[in-house]
Image: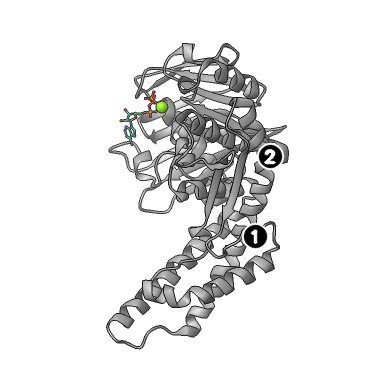
Amino acid sequence: MHVTHLSLADFRSYARAEVELGPGVSSFVGPNGQGKTNLVEAVGYLATLGSHRVSADAPLVRAGAERAVVRAAVVEGDRRQLVELELNPGRANRARINRSSQVRPRDVLGIVRTVLFAPEDLALVKGDPGDRRRFLDELVTARVPRLAGVRSDYERVLRQRNTLLKSAAMARRHGGRGVDLTTLDVWDQHLARAGAELWGQRLGLLAALGPLADKAYEELAPSGGPVGLEYRAAAVEEPVDAAGREELYGVLLAALGEARKREIERGVTLVGPHRDELVLRLGELPAKGYASHGESWSLALALRLAAYELLRQEGPEPVLVLDDVFAELDARRRERLAGLVSGGEQVLVTAAVPEDVPAVLAGARFAVSGGRVERE
Ligand SMILES: Nc1ncnc2c1ncn2[C@@H]1O[C@H](COP(=O)(O)OP(=O)(O)OP(=O)(O)O)[C@@H](O)[C@H]1O
Ligand SMILES: [Mg+2]
């Protein structure tokens, strides 16, 4: 698929922007702070309902404005669709498809597909487990949009269960009656149900992604590999692979039972996908804490390229976004990356100076400066 028109109103630094896009490569070039990343961030938002830079929507709305609107015309084969999201920080966001009736924002998922690689992705390797969980969950949702519902169910159940555990912990400390265990049993089942679904999807994703990530790393970097992706679940000591949902449900429920005493003491849920970790390895060593800066960068990029390859194999080709990545790469890696992605249906590249963009990726060039985006 590709985006043929992007329209922004009060998004980030843009009061308004209208950008015509074609298939193939488009590059956005301009000095720092002119709004290049803001543009591609908007495309990414349509695909994931989130920003790759911030976790809340408020910074995405232009300072002084009340709401932002991101709209895109999208072509997939011979099908055309118009998607629109209205961001209302502090209130519910709104969505429309083809200008018609109101739909839920999550109904928009799957129309715009993107894989976005940006400097922030170094956190995939060096950051907290939460950064890697977000990577996995965005990707499972891109593969199976209905997972957006499972994720929000899981988060809701987790919040409610934590509230219950917290009040139990308080009651204990003050010599009260403690928690109603029957109620907790019910929450355990809900948590295990949604948790097993998410866990299973993450495991399935990793099985498909592993070989692709290893291949992409090998193509980019001369040494360090192979890449290892190991899922470490808080619920079990030993890795469980590719188990069925019922089995994972049983494992999770049993682990919740076992952790209950500690959970009631601490007032928080200690097992489940929200505590799981994806361990990345280069060769024998964990990447986090061991890999060099260049290796970490190549590994993060390899993960994104693997995601791109996977989504491409499984459904409509995603838009590949490369935000400011070439400046970080040496000449050899630049050429490799350019070669790997130049045949993509749509590739959006940003760079501060034109020299950073390899010749094969120059494509249609846009100058971004002072809030204006102009085709050169
Ligand atoms: N909500 C907002 N309201 C107004 N301006 C904003 C908002 N959010 C960000 N900006 C402005 O947008 C600019 C950053 O834009 P962006 O990140 O797209 O820059 P860039 O062109 O990618 O720069 P670089 O080359 O440094 O990556 C900053 O000047 C910032 O102050
Ligand atoms: Mg930028």
Pick the front one: 144 or 177: 177
Q: As shown in the figure, which amino acid type bears the numbered disc 2?
A: Pro
Q: Residue at x 50, y 66 (%)?
A: 271
The answer for how far apart the CA atoms under marks 1 and 2 are is: 18 Å
365 versus 172 height, above or below: above
**Residue 180, quarter of the rendered image:** bottom left
The residue wearing badge 1 is 240
Under circle 2, the secondary element is helix
- Expressed as whole percent of the image width and height from the top left, the position of residue 64 reads 28, 38
219 versus 71 height, above or below: above
Q: Residue at x 36, y 30 (%)?
A: 15
Q: Are marks 1 and 2 in contact (CB under 8 Å)?
A: no
- Ligand 2 placement by image quarter: top left
- Expressed as whole percent of the image width and height from the top left, the position of residue 325 reads 49, 25
360 versus 157 height, above or below: above
Q: As shown in the figure, which amino acid type bears the numbered disc 1?
A: Val
- Is residue 124 left or right of 201 when viewed as pictured? left
| Picture disc at residue 211 | 2
Under circle 1, the secondary element is loop
